[in-house]
Protein backbone atom coordinates (compact mmCIF):
# COMPACT_ATOMS: atom_id res chain seq x y z
CA UNK A 1 0.00 0.00 0.00
CA UNK A 2 2.76 2.41 0.94
CA UNK A 3 4.78 1.57 -2.18
CA UNK A 4 1.73 2.23 -4.37
CA UNK A 5 1.09 5.58 -2.70
CA UNK A 6 4.76 6.49 -3.11
CA UNK A 7 4.73 5.46 -6.78
CA UNK A 8 1.69 7.64 -7.45
CA UNK A 9 3.39 10.56 -5.74
CA UNK A 10 6.72 10.09 -7.54
CA UNK A 11 5.27 9.74 -11.04
CA UNK A 12 2.69 12.50 -10.67
CA UNK A 13 4.83 14.92 -8.60
CA UNK A 14 1.68 15.40 -6.54
CA UNK A 15 0.23 13.71 -3.44
CA UNK A 16 -0.44 9.96 -3.65
CA UNK A 17 -3.16 8.36 -1.50
CA UNK A 18 -4.24 4.74 -0.96
CA UNK A 19 -7.19 3.57 1.14
CA UNK A 20 -6.51 0.23 2.86
CA UNK A 21 -8.64 -2.74 1.72
CA UNK A 22 -12.19 -2.80 3.05
CA UNK A 23 -11.99 -6.39 4.26
CA UNK A 24 -15.52 -6.13 5.67
CA UNK A 25 -16.83 -6.14 2.08
CA UNK A 26 -15.57 -9.68 1.50
CA UNK A 27 -17.04 -13.03 2.47
CA UNK A 28 -14.97 -15.14 4.81
CA UNK A 29 -13.81 -18.51 3.46
CA UNK A 30 -11.84 -19.64 6.51
CA UNK A 31 -10.71 -18.42 9.89
CA UNK A 32 -7.79 -20.19 11.54
CA UNK A 33 -5.48 -19.96 14.55
CA UNK A 34 -2.11 -21.75 14.53
CA UNK A 35 0.09 -22.05 17.61
CA UNK A 36 3.54 -20.54 16.93
CA UNK A 37 4.88 -20.21 20.48
CA UNK A 38 3.92 -20.38 24.10
CA UNK A 39 0.76 -18.29 24.48
CA UNK A 40 1.22 -16.96 20.97
CA UNK A 41 -0.95 -17.67 17.91
CA UNK A 42 -0.72 -16.85 14.22
CA UNK A 43 -4.26 -15.86 13.25
CA UNK A 44 -5.40 -15.83 9.63
CA UNK A 45 -8.53 -14.69 7.80
CA UNK A 46 -8.87 -16.17 4.32
CA UNK A 47 -11.35 -14.22 2.19
CA UNK A 48 -13.53 -15.47 -0.65
CA UNK A 49 -11.26 -13.90 -3.27
CA UNK A 50 -8.08 -15.40 -1.80
CA UNK A 51 -6.95 -12.31 0.12
CA UNK A 52 -5.34 -13.32 3.42
CA UNK A 53 -5.10 -11.07 6.47
CA UNK A 54 -2.87 -12.39 9.25
CA UNK A 55 -1.58 -11.20 12.59
CA UNK A 56 0.01 -12.44 15.81
CA UNK A 57 -2.33 -12.82 18.79
CA UNK A 58 -1.15 -13.15 22.40
CA UNK A 59 -3.16 -15.44 24.68
CA UNK A 60 -3.55 -15.46 28.46
CA UNK A 61 -3.08 -19.22 28.88
CA UNK A 62 -1.74 -22.23 26.91
CA UNK A 63 -4.10 -24.54 25.04
CA UNK A 64 -4.96 -28.09 25.94
CA UNK A 65 -4.53 -30.91 23.39
CA UNK A 66 -7.12 -30.57 20.64
CA UNK A 67 -8.55 -27.34 22.05
CA UNK A 68 -7.34 -25.16 19.20
CA UNK A 69 -8.86 -27.52 16.63
CA UNK A 70 -12.23 -27.28 18.40
CA UNK A 71 -11.91 -23.49 18.48
CA UNK A 72 -11.13 -23.29 14.74
CA UNK A 73 -14.01 -25.64 13.83
CA UNK A 74 -16.49 -23.76 16.01
CA UNK A 75 -15.55 -20.33 14.69
CA UNK A 76 -15.72 -21.51 11.09
CA UNK A 77 -19.20 -22.92 11.71
CA UNK A 78 -20.24 -19.43 12.86
CA UNK A 79 -18.44 -17.46 10.18
CA UNK A 80 -18.00 -19.36 6.92
CA UNK A 81 -19.63 -17.72 3.91
CA UNK A 82 -20.58 -14.51 5.73
CA UNK A 83 -19.26 -11.02 5.11
CA UNK A 84 -16.72 -9.92 7.68
CA UNK A 85 -19.08 -7.26 9.01
CA UNK A 86 -21.70 -9.99 9.59
CA UNK A 87 -19.13 -12.19 11.30
CA UNK A 88 -18.22 -9.31 13.60
CA UNK A 89 -21.87 -8.84 14.57
CA UNK A 90 -22.42 -12.59 15.08
CA UNK A 91 -19.42 -12.99 17.39
CA UNK A 92 -20.39 -9.90 19.40
CA UNK A 93 -23.93 -11.23 19.77
CA UNK A 94 -22.66 -14.54 21.15
CA UNK A 95 -20.32 -12.76 23.55
CA UNK A 96 -23.21 -10.71 24.90
CA UNK A 97 -24.89 -13.88 26.19
CA UNK A 98 -24.34 -15.44 29.61
CA UNK A 99 -20.77 -16.74 29.80
CA UNK A 100 -21.93 -19.68 31.95
CA UNK A 101 -23.81 -21.10 28.95
CA UNK A 102 -20.54 -21.98 27.25
CA UNK A 103 -17.79 -24.47 27.86
CA UNK A 104 -14.43 -22.88 28.60
CA UNK A 105 -12.97 -23.61 25.15
CA UNK A 106 -16.08 -22.25 23.44
CA UNK A 107 -15.90 -18.94 25.30
CA UNK A 108 -12.18 -18.70 24.47
CA UNK A 109 -13.09 -19.26 20.83
CA UNK A 110 -15.50 -16.33 20.88
CA UNK A 111 -12.97 -14.07 22.59
CA UNK A 112 -10.29 -14.97 20.04
CA UNK A 113 -12.75 -14.53 17.19
CA UNK A 114 -13.71 -11.07 18.41
CA UNK A 115 -10.06 -10.04 18.44
CA UNK A 116 -9.45 -11.39 14.95
CA UNK A 117 -12.50 -9.90 13.23
CA UNK A 118 -12.52 -6.64 15.16
CA UNK A 119 -11.75 -3.31 13.48
CA UNK A 120 -8.31 -3.35 11.90
CA UNK A 121 -6.55 -1.14 9.41
CA UNK A 122 -9.46 -0.72 7.03
CA UNK A 123 -9.92 2.97 7.85
CA UNK A 124 -6.27 3.75 7.28
CA UNK A 125 -5.19 6.01 4.45
CA UNK A 126 -1.59 5.98 3.29
CA UNK A 127 -0.55 9.43 2.05
CA UNK A 128 2.78 10.18 0.38
CA UNK A 129 4.19 13.32 -1.23
CA UNK A 130 2.66 16.15 0.78
CA UNK A 131 5.92 18.03 0.22
CA UNK A 132 5.16 18.10 -3.52
CA UNK A 133 2.27 20.46 -2.79
CA UNK A 134 4.64 22.87 -1.03
CA UNK A 135 6.68 23.16 -4.22
CA UNK A 136 3.70 23.55 -6.53
CA UNK A 137 3.68 27.03 -8.13
CA UNK A 138 -0.11 26.92 -8.53
CA UNK A 139 -0.67 26.76 -4.77
CA UNK A 140 0.63 30.21 -3.86
CA UNK A 141 -1.55 31.29 -0.92
CA UNK A 142 0.49 30.21 2.12
CA UNK A 143 -2.43 30.27 4.55
CA UNK A 144 -4.63 28.21 2.25
CA UNK A 145 -1.75 25.82 1.56
CA UNK A 146 -1.20 25.24 5.27
CA UNK A 147 -4.92 24.65 5.73
CA UNK A 148 -4.89 22.21 2.82
CA UNK A 149 -1.99 20.26 4.30
CA UNK A 150 -3.74 20.08 7.68
CA UNK A 151 -6.88 18.76 5.98
CA UNK A 152 -4.89 16.08 4.17
CA UNK A 153 -2.97 15.18 7.32
CA UNK A 154 -6.21 14.70 9.29
CA UNK A 155 -7.25 12.22 6.55
CA UNK A 156 -10.96 12.52 7.39
CA UNK A 157 -11.96 14.22 4.13
CA UNK A 158 -9.56 12.14 2.04
CA UNK A 159 -11.02 8.98 3.55
CA UNK A 160 -14.55 10.18 2.79
CA UNK A 161 -13.74 11.00 -0.85
CA UNK A 162 -11.94 7.73 -1.48
CA UNK A 163 -14.82 5.83 0.09
CA UNK A 164 -17.25 7.49 -2.34
CA UNK A 165 -15.39 6.04 -5.32
CA UNK A 166 -15.16 2.41 -4.16
CA UNK A 167 -18.27 1.32 -6.08
CA UNK A 168 -17.78 3.62 -9.07
CA UNK A 169 -16.65 2.37 -12.48
CA UNK A 170 -13.33 3.54 -13.87
CA UNK A 171 -11.33 6.58 -12.84
CA UNK A 172 -13.23 9.33 -11.00
CA UNK A 173 -12.17 13.00 -11.13
CA UNK A 174 -13.22 15.60 -8.54
CA UNK A 175 -12.24 19.19 -9.37
CA UNK A 176 -12.44 22.21 -7.07
CA UNK A 177 -15.91 22.71 -5.62
CA UNK A 178 -16.93 19.16 -6.68
CA UNK A 179 -14.92 17.93 -3.69
CA UNK A 180 -17.40 19.66 -1.41
CA UNK A 181 -14.98 21.11 1.12
CA UNK A 182 -13.70 24.69 1.10
CA UNK A 183 -10.17 23.65 2.07
CA UNK A 184 -9.86 21.65 -1.16
CA UNK A 185 -11.58 24.04 -3.58
CA UNK A 186 -8.26 24.86 -5.21
CA UNK A 187 -7.40 21.17 -5.64
CA UNK A 188 -8.54 18.06 -7.44
CA UNK A 189 -8.62 14.33 -6.78
CA UNK A 190 -8.15 11.62 -9.40
CA UNK A 191 -9.18 8.25 -7.93
CA UNK A 192 -10.04 4.66 -8.87
CA UNK A 193 -11.09 1.51 -7.05
CA UNK A 194 -8.92 -1.61 -6.87
CA UNK A 195 -9.74 -5.21 -6.05
CA UNK A 196 -11.48 -6.66 -9.10
CA UNK A 197 -15.16 -7.61 -9.18
CA UNK A 198 -15.51 -6.90 -5.46
CA UNK A 199 -13.63 -3.61 -4.95
CA UNK A 200 -11.54 -3.56 -1.79
CA UNK A 201 -10.43 0.06 -1.63
CA UNK A 202 -9.43 3.08 -3.67
CA UNK A 203 -6.31 5.02 -4.57
CA UNK A 204 -5.55 8.30 -6.26
CA UNK A 205 -3.71 11.57 -6.64
CA UNK A 206 -4.37 14.94 -4.98
CA UNK A 207 -3.02 18.07 -6.62
CA UNK A 208 -4.00 21.51 -7.94
CA UNK A 209 -7.17 21.91 -9.99
CA UNK A 210 -5.15 22.27 -13.20
CA UNK A 211 -3.61 18.80 -13.11
CA UNK A 212 -2.37 17.14 -16.30
CA UNK A 213 -5.43 14.88 -16.46
CA UNK A 214 -4.59 13.16 -19.79
CA UNK A 215 -1.38 11.89 -18.19
CA UNK A 216 -2.59 11.22 -14.64
CA UNK A 217 -5.87 9.43 -15.35
CA UNK A 218 -4.02 6.54 -17.09
CA UNK A 219 -1.47 6.51 -14.24
CA UNK A 220 -4.21 6.04 -11.64
CA UNK A 221 -5.89 3.38 -13.78
CA UNK A 222 -2.59 1.51 -14.13
CA UNK A 223 -1.89 1.72 -10.38
CA UNK A 224 -5.34 0.29 -9.60
CA UNK A 225 -4.82 -2.62 -12.00
CA UNK A 226 -1.34 -3.31 -10.65
CA UNK A 227 -2.48 -3.30 -7.03
CA UNK A 228 -5.44 -5.54 -7.90
CA UNK A 229 -3.08 -8.03 -9.55
CA UNK A 230 -0.72 -7.94 -6.56
CA UNK A 231 -3.55 -8.66 -4.11
CA UNK A 232 -5.72 -11.19 -5.91
CA UNK A 233 -4.01 -12.04 -9.18
CA UNK A 234 -6.59 -10.36 -11.44
CA UNK A 235 -5.82 -7.76 -14.10
Image (cartoon, grey):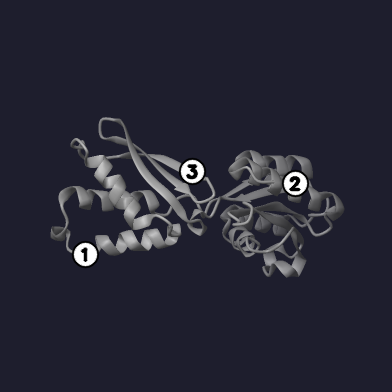
Instruction: Judge by depth and name the residue closer to the eye, 152 or 16.
Output: 16
- The first of marks 3 and 2 along the sequence is 3
The residue depicted at 64 percent of the width and 46 percent of the height is 228
3D distance between C-alphas at marks 1 and 3: 30 Å
Q: Find out whether the residues at labels 3 and 2 contact each other: C-beta distance under 8 Å.
A: no
Q: Give the number of callouts.
A: 3
- The first of marks 1 and 3 along the sequence is 3
Helix, strand or loop at mark 1:
loop
- The first of marks 2 and 1 along the sequence is 1
- 170 left or right of 234 in image: right
Residue 144 visible here: yes
Can you identify the residue that label 1 sits on? 97
Can you identify the residue that label 2 sits on? 222
The residue depicted at 22 percent of the width and 38 percent of the height is 66
Q: Quadrant of the N terminus?
A: top right
Count neighbours of disc 2 (C-alpha within 10 A) and say few if under 14, some if 14 to 19, many if 20 or more. Answer: some
Instruction: Judge by depth and name the residue closer to the eye, 65 or 215.
Output: 65
Q: Position of residue 164 (x, y in %)?
A: 63, 65
Can you identify the residue that label 3 sits on? 52
Above or below: residue 80 compared with residue 36: below
Q: Quadrant of residue 61?
A: top left
3D distance between C-alphas at marks 3 and 2: 23 Å
Amino acid sequence: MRNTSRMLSDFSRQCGVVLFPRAARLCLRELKFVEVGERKLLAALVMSNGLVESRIVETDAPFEAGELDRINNYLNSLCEGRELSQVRARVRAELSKDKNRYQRWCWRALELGARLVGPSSEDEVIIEGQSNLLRNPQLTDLDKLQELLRTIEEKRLVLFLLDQTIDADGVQVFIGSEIGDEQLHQCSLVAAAYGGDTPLGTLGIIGPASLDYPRLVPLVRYAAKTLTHSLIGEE
